[in-house]
Amino acid sequence: MTDFSRILLATDFSERSENAAQRVLLLESAGVKELRLLHVLSGTLLDELKHLVSKGVSARLREAMQQKLIEQATKLQTATGLNVECNLEIGRPHAVIIQQGKETDSLIVVGAHASAVRDWVQGSMLERLLGGSQQPMLVVRQPAKTPYRRVLVPVDFSPCSAAAVEAAMKLAPQAEITLLHVSALPFESKLRFAGISEAEMTEYRLTCRQGAEREMDSFMQGLTMHSKPLVSRLEYGNAPEVILEMVDREASDLIVMGRYGKSGIGQMLLGSVTEYVATTSDRDIMVVGL
């Protein structure tokens, strides 16, 4: 099962980062033992400041950021009772976060706006983090007021999907967890062009669903028991769209997805779907690997 005893909290001292910090405080049941606070100053920004103003400004900026790190670390330490380590680094933010997450073998936690606006960890930054890191990553978009209560886990029955379910149970042990599988008839539009009747299409869809039902039953039997019964849902359609619709329908406050998935006819390409959902949804999302 995924280990969440070590957390790397990346901050830019914004409101979204404060949301991420507050969420970390609610993860006590996940068994957190080590907490590291990281702020990355862009090397490009510091170089620009040297050219535009004076070298002393860069030094003062580093001192100010270090002081803010210490202040936030002190607050987190008081709230958690943990010894919070704080690090100020200079470089490319996504590269430094990925490197430190790997070196400390930590769950990476970052904050993001709830909207789809591209910012510090939205758009290209989030894509770089997801594409470059193999560590589990929690992207916090909503203010953290209570522990997670309703978790949606899209699955394609791959080992990475199983890891996502295990991670959801570890991170949110008291939550109601729903497993969602989205299936679609392979090459449906081409079958229509080939003159396949609607009756035949309906029969094909039924066969597809029956296969998914068998796979879901087998998949769930191989999972570790949860404190609450797991709920399963089988839907038909375009995977990213159905996932986002289900999030709203179920009022999910967390989505947990595998970083990679199965490929091939009839299977949800979890990797590309994960990236789309992670950069589009307004809910918190955790992405895990094997």
Image (cartoon, rainbow, N blue to C red):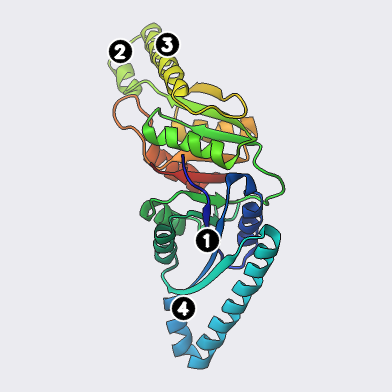
Q: Earlier in the sequence, mark 2 or mark 3?
A: 2
Residues tagged 2 and 1 counted as in contact (Cβ below 8 A): no
Q: In this view, does 95 lie above or below 135?
A: below
Q: Nearer the viewer, residue 186 or 190?
A: 186
Residue 54, can we see it? no
Q: Which mark is residue 195?
A: 2
Q: Which of marks 1 and 4 is nearer the N terminus?
A: 4
According to the picture, the residue beneath numbered tag 4 turns out to be: 45
Q: Badge 2, how many Cα within 10 Å: few under 14, some, many 20+? A: few
Give the distance between the C-alpha atoms of the residues marked 2 and 1, in whole angstroms: 47 Å
Q: Which amino acid does label 1 sit on?
A: Asp
Q: Badge 1, how many Cα within 10 Å: few under 14, some, many 20+? A: few
Whole-percent x, y for residue 275 in the image: 43, 45
The residue under the point 52% across, 92% down is: 56
Q: Earlier in the sequence, mark 4 or mark 3?
A: 4
Q: Which of marks 2 and 4 is nearer the N terminus?
A: 4
The residue under the point 41% across, 29% down is: 156
Label 2 residue SS: loop
Give the distance between the C-alpha atoms of the residues marked 4 and 3, in whole angstroms: 57 Å
Label 3 residue SS: helix
